[in-house]
Image (tube, rainbow, N blue to C red):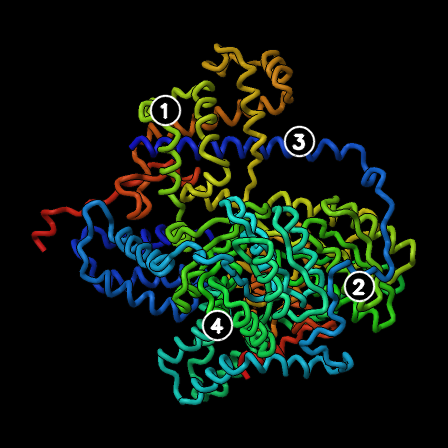
Amino acid sequence: MVRMFDTLSERLESAFKRLRGRGKLTEDQVNEALKEVRTALLEADVHLNVVREFISRVRERAVGQEVLKSLSPAQQVVKIVHEELVGILGGSAKPLSFSPKPPTVVMIAGLQGSGKTTAAGKLAGWLKRKGKRPILVACDLQRPAAVQQLVLLGEQVGVPVVTRDGMSPVEVAAAGVEEAIRTNRDVVIVDTAGRLHVDEELMQEAADIKRRINPLETLFVADSMTGQDAATVAAAFLERVDFTGTVLTKLDGDARGGAALSIAHISGRPLKFISDGEKLDAFEPFHPDRLASRILGMGDVMTLIEKAEEVYEEEQARELEEKLRTAKFTFDDFLDQMRQIKKMGSLKNLLGLVPGVGAQLRGMEIDENQMTRTEAIICSMTRQERGEPALIKGSRRDRIARGSGTTTSEVNSLLKQFDQARKMMRAMAGGGGMPSMPHGAVKQEQRPKSSAEKRKPRPKPHRPNKKKKKRR
Amino acid sequence: MTIIWILIGIAVLGLLLAGVALAGRRGAVEAPKAPPKAGPAAPPPPVVEAPPEPWPGVEIPEAPPVGIPETPPVAEAPRWRDRLSRARQSFGANLTGIFNRGSLTEEDWEDIEALLLQADVGVVATQRMIADLRERSKKETDPEAVVQTLHAELVAILGDGDRSLARNEGGLTIWLVTGVNGTGKTTTIGKLAGRLAREGKSVVLAAADTFRAAADAQLETWASRSGAEVVKHAAGADPAAVAFDGVRAAKARGSDFLIVDTAGRLHTKTSLMEELAKIRRVVEREAGPPHEVLLVLDATTGQNGIAQARAFTEAAGVTGIALTKLDGTAKGGIVIACQQELGLPVKLVGLGEGIEDLAPFDPHAFVDALLD
């Protein structure tokens, strides 16, 4: 079986088990760790040559480095790897540029099926939300009904679409730019046909379109599920259309997205946008550290912490902590917390950010309406019942179900889950030990692990012993 | 420190809700099962359009500039090799280069490993294969023999079984086509319809991709090239209802084939995978299990291909893979892992945008192209 959900940090921890307590990272240690890094990157679909170069850079940085006080050697290596990844992915990250003399012309190019037309529609919607006046141009005359698709997308996001019959793609593109000037639009998004990078004729056509409309931005659209071929394709597109940035699509799947690293490394062009959902607003500027964490199979704790800090008052958080720790967690607290968390965004997205949990629940779709129903159930309980769930027996359950417009079985399952959750909290609090920390990004913080692991106490994070160091 | 507890809170809350949601869903799914065989209640009359009218404003390239060669389908195997040869040099040339140097050093083995990895074969499968090869080639000094061992190994993994698409001779054959977004499902169906039309079969296509904008128009364009009929509903309709109408229409017309197109869906979206399972159930109830459930896999797909194959097999009982876009530089090595781990055979390969560019999968040609 492929160990699909193993995170790099977990692997490194196990590789380093015998190697704790050293002051500096030795070459052997680093090499051992880098084997794991190599496997993780390859499984994330990073191109082999990119992996090799990357590894040698990390090795150079890591050997001989002091292990920071708060980190174990494994964490130290992950920290370096993470930093290097962020460097490649976002070293030169720039937002979309706009021409001082509108319209700004944006050309979209890529392989078939990478999601160009959808990305074009989403980009138009995003620009519109940013207060721009975009216009779309349908130059994909290759795939049947591609023009129709763009017209429908344009309607959905409320952006006009230029279509022309009986013209070549190059002419349509030029006509689109003229139309934009005539109708006073400030961004022109030119959607082109998908083309294979080895198709000389079509690559020439793309180069011709580019020469004719002279776009300020040329976006290369890449599927995040692409494997090793991403490097070859990116190199070919760079050579022929010299793209200025990459749009990474289909990130709502469970691919690690290592292709992005290959593309960024090979082309030296920044990733500009990610597209991660069926809805047309699932499109946003790219965050290098998020993807770096994803490639390494880690959650994105920083974003989560930021979000939590936005909605939680310090006092509130402390109270919550106390309650969770002493397992005096009642339905009232649960309701409170649920309402706070609701403010932080969709639960599914939040869970995705929690390391460990993210991987387990990524495939699970959580019905946000369920939250509303759960809320209704709790609100139908009396104050006393909320404090002492044990009170809730047969007839009370029926009453609560009627009051909340749910079924008795739903009430039952909530009670059961709640009870289990309390037990779990008690086990955690009783165990005393907290899970070890994930990686350097989370200073001094510790992370929750997946539910199974929560039950057992984890060893305290390793702190190198100063005395030992002197002795060596 | 406090933040941790918030994190734990979120995790606990998430698990709790997920548990409740699952319990709730189970209840919800079972409930409507009670009135069985009711069928999709009062299905809207099937909209069958024979040769569809082209969409206004859509230019349908009668003959796409990227050659649709006028060659008959007989020449498929050689054509495939020919197409592959574009991409062939890197892998094959390197490999023979390595082996021709004589005795095998550690570095050579690393190079072989690298070549397999670069073909998207995957870390686990590659390491397993290399270990095996090393074991077998211990006493071997002739590099050619090692090449042959690897070749044989790859062919053996892919298997030499029957790869023709299952048909229901004398009755209605139903093929269901699935896959993630953008792999080429509709295009593959268009090509399949074209092949069947040349055999003189009557074909109905069910446009059960009611999600993506203009997906049905794309299917209709393909249908017009092969003279197949298209059953479709309005955008956003229940795809299972389209499949239902497709079965009804195909039966009423006494057609030979029904091919059901489905919307591209990421395998991680539970609700969409459930929708797919429902499409299959409806077809199965009306006409028995589909004769083939094809997973269309893009040759450029990396290690995620395994996860896709696994999830689609669970939801819809995939019987074979159609490997598309093999005319680029991607090797499609992920199908080796699909065969090894899931026992899913590749049945078709897509080699371009023309209606003729679909060939039966030939493991020897595939491996030849890799090792040459």
**Image location of residue A346, percent across then percent down:** 50, 36
Disc 2 and disc 4 on one polypeptide chain:
no
Disc 4 and disc 3 on one polypeptide chain:
no
Q: Residue B207 falls in which quadrant of the image?
A: bottom right
Q: Are marks 1 and 4 in contact (CB under 8 Å)?
A: no
Disc 1 and disc 4 on one polypeptide chain:
yes
A384 in relation to A178, above or below: above
Q: Mark 2 points at which residue?
A: B223
**Secondary-structure class at tag 4:** helix
Mark before the other along the chain sequence, 3 or 2: 3
Q: Residues within 10 Å of mark 1 (few under 14, many from 20)?
A: many
Q: Mark 4 points at which residue?
A: A232
- How far is the residue under mark 2 from the one under mark 1? 61 Å
B206 in relation to A69, above or below: below
The amino acid on which the numbered mark 4 sits, given as a three-letter code, is Thr
Letter of the chain that mark 3 sits on in the rendering: B
Q: Are marks 1 and 3 in contact (CB under 8 Å)?
A: no
Q: Do the residues labelled 3 and 2 touch (CB within 8 Å)?
A: no
Disc 3 and disc 2 on one polypeptide chain:
yes
User: On residue B27, which mark appears?
Assistant: 3
A281 horizontally vs B160: left or right: left
**Secondary-structure class at tag 1:** helix
The amino acid on which the numbered mark 2 sits, given as a three-letter code, is Ala
For the C terminus of chain A, give its image quadrant: bottom left
Q: Nearer the viewer, mark 3 or mark 2?
A: 2
Residue at 58% in and 70% down? B157
User: On residue A320, which mark appears?
Assistant: 1
**Secondary-structure class at tag 2:** helix
Letter of the chain that mark 1 sits on in the rendering: A
